[in-house]
Image (tube, helix red, strand yellow):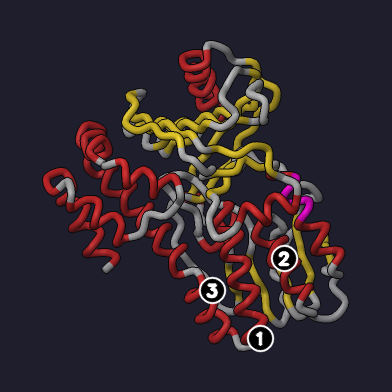
């Protein structure tokens, strides 16, 4: 039971919720953090795009496993883009360690951690920071990942899009000495864990020549849920707000940035919910644009069908993929990119302009 009403109640102690609780507690707020689990276990979420100074935060928390500066993009197995950058674009992190560190720091700042289901308790300000189960089932995609023994460049990541199944396979390094990988997949058309595992297994044999699982798990990820930063008297952050980049499945960076932005908004405008939300949405306007564009890209490619979608994706110039890997694709970037490919890009431009202008 919560003795009295806390200034801020946060439901969900993942990355967004734990970081938000830490930031607010540091500012002197009374914070209660509720989660059903005492430790974090999820199937994916090990990559973080390195922008906005996030590497410093991750290194300070001691959760960086390896840094990725080399990428290979495939479509139905065909390589369409590969490049090595002078500076890392992604960090592969120990996600359970990240969440544990943020929770510990939140508690060190005297945030109260409560284990159990959130039963709509309220604070003066209430925040929903839960994961995919905060959204409707139709907005989620089931993913399956395996940590497997395999030789792999610890600085390289691979994404292989399957447009027929509407999703992609991935191979990320799982250590810094090239002995294990994080290999997995997520598709809109596949939600059976046993079948998805078999697809990952076959893909592993095909590309790596081996499949030696050390750890396996599956979980849903929000990819199409609406972006809702406030619902009634409840503010939403991270995946609960729908802030996941659909075309890459990345939710860590949006979770971190939205938590930081919401913490600043609450600190500036507490307890005025209208002003808090206005400041919050303004602070994450670029993140919202990136998420909306990723969904529109996904929608247009799906409507084009596998063959035309493959042609469209193959026509994308290297500049687009550089932005994509940095989670930096906004409406403006897509339009400028597509203008260089007017024939294949016409439908995409029209769709983006009509929905996002």
Image quarter hosting the N terminus = bottom right
Residue 17 % position (x, y): 68, 62
Compute the Cα span from label 1 to label 3.
Answer: 15 Å
Q: Residue at x 15, y 51 (%)?
A: 346
Q: Earlier in the sequence, mark 2 or mark 1?
A: 2
Q: Residue at x 55, y 37 (%)?
A: 68
Q: Residue at x 71, y 82 (%)?
A: 124
Q: Is residue 147 visible?
A: yes
Residue 104 % position (x, y): 83, 57
Q: Main secondary structure of the magenta part?
A: helix
Compute the Cα span from label 2 to label 3.
Answer: 18 Å
For the residue pair 66 and 130, the one nearer the viewer reads as 66
Q: Which residue is mark 3?
A: 230
Q: Earlier in the sequence, mark 1 or mark 3?
A: 3
> From the viewer's perspective, is residue 273 above or below residue 109?
below
Q: Helix or strand or loop: what does disc 2 sit on?
A: loop
Residue 272 found in image quarter: bottom right
Choose mark 2 or mark 3, whichever is in front: 3
The extreme front residue here reads 86
Q: Which residue is mark 2?
A: 119
Q: Are marks 2 and 3 in contact (CB under 8 Å)?
A: no
Q: Helix or strand or loop: what does disc 1 sit on?
A: loop
> From the viewer's perspective, is residue 265 above or below residue 56?
below
Tell me if 10 is positioned left or right of 219 in this view: right
């Amino acid at each position: 039971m919560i003795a009295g009403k806390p200034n801020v109640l946060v439901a969900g102690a993942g990355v967004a919720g734990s970081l938000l609780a830490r930031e607010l507690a540091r500012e002197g707020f009374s914070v209660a953090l509720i989660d059903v689990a005492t430790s974090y276990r999820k199937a994916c979420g090990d990559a973080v795009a390195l922008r906005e100074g996030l590497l410093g935060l991750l290194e300070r928390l001691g959760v960086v496993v390896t840094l990725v500066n080399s990428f290979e993009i495939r479509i139905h197995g065909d390589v369409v883009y590969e490049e090595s950058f002078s500076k890392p674009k992604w960090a592969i992190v120990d996600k359970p360690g990240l969440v544990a560190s943020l929770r510990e720091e939140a508690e060190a700042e005297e945030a109260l951690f409560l284990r159990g289901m959130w039963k709509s308790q309220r604070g003066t300000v209430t925040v929903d920071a839960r994961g995919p189960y905060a959204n409707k089932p139709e907005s989620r995609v089931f993913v399956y990942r395996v940590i497997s023994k395999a030789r792999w460049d610890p600085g390289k990541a691979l994404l292989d899009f399957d447009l027929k199944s509407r999703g992609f396979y991935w191979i990320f390094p799982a250590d810094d000495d090239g002995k294990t990988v994080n290999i997995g997949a997520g598709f809109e058309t596949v939600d059976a864990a046993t079948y998805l595992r078999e697809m990952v297994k076959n893909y592993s044999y095909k590309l790596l020549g081996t499949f030696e699982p050390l750890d396996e798990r599956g979980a849903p990820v929000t990819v199409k849920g609406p972006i809702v930063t406030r619902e009634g008297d409840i503010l939403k952050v991270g995946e609960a707000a729908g802030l996941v980049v659909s075309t890459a499945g990345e939710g860590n960076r949006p979770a971190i940035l939205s938590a930081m932005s919401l913490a600043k908004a609450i600190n500036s405008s507490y307890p005025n919910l209208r002003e808090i939300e206005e400041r919050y949405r303004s602070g994450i306007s670029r993140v919202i644009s990136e998420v909306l564009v990723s969904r529109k890209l996904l929608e247009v490619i799906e409507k084009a069908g596998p063959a035309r979608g493959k042609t469209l994706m193959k026509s994308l110039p290297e500049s687009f993929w550089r932005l994509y890997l940095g989670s930096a694709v906004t409406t403006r970037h897509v339009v400028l990119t597509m203008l260089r490919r007017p024939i294949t890009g016409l439908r995409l431009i029209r769709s983006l302009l009509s929905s996002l202008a």
